[in-house]
Image: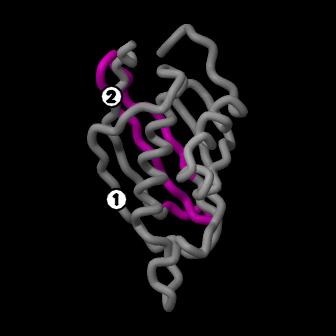
Amino acid sequence: MTDKALPSKEDIQARLLRGPYHQWLGIEVLSVAEGEIELRARWREEWVVNPDKRYTHGGILAALVDLTADWALVSSTGRGVPTIDLRVDYHRAALPGDLVAKGKVIKFGSQVSVAEAQVFDKDGKLVASGRGVYSTAAPQA
């Protein structure tokens, strides 16, 4: 992908936590490799969409798919990138508990790239997955 040094897990953590929404999600970077990232989101009661069934709102799962796929590109871009298109599939209800998301680059391009992510519940069961298209063009000065 690139000959540049891979940003450290701590560096990516600091960059992610600049965003208030990422802070609210309780994002923690678990691991980083070339074209891959693994994140954890700490459970929040505010995620509950149905108080009787107690499952997590799909918007939280979609946000984690987008965020994780986006930041899987960091080994090539050194930064988060704008989303062009996003597809999310929901596989089962995510009950209360931390969520782990794993992302990987599918295709890196100089202008547009594709990455995917999977979100797992506290028991390691797949709750959502998706694929995004991201603008990876160099930032304009």
Looking at the rendered structure, the secondary structure element under dot 1 is strand
Q: Nearer the viewer, residue 47 or 32?
A: 47
Q: Which residue is mark 1?
A: 89
Q: Amino acid at mark 2?
A: Ser
Residue most extreme to the front = 141
Q: Amino acid at mark 1?
A: Asp
Residue drawn at x 50%, y 61% is 126
**Which of pointers 2 and 1 indicates the residue nearer the eye?**
2
Q: Quadrant of the C terminus?
A: top left
Above or below for 108 versus 141: below
Q: Nearer the viewer, residue 101 or 64?
A: 64
Q: Is residue 101 left or right of residue 92?
A: right
Above or below for 140 versus 129: above
| Residue 95, picture quadrant | bottom right
Does residue 111 show up magenta in the picture?
yes
Above or below for 78 versus 36: above
Residue most extreme to the bottom = 52
Q: Position of residue 3 (x, y in %)?
A: 55, 8
Residue drawn at x 63%, y 43% is 17
Q: Which residues are magenta?
A: 101-126
The residue carrying pointer 2 sits among few (fewer than 14), some (14 to 19) or many (20 or more) residues within 10 Å by Cα, namely some
Q: Which residue is mark 2?
A: 135
Query: Any mark on residue 13, and which?
Result: none
Residue most extreme to the right = 10
Residue drawn at x 30%, y 25% is 112
- Between discs 2 and 1, the one toward the N terminus: 1
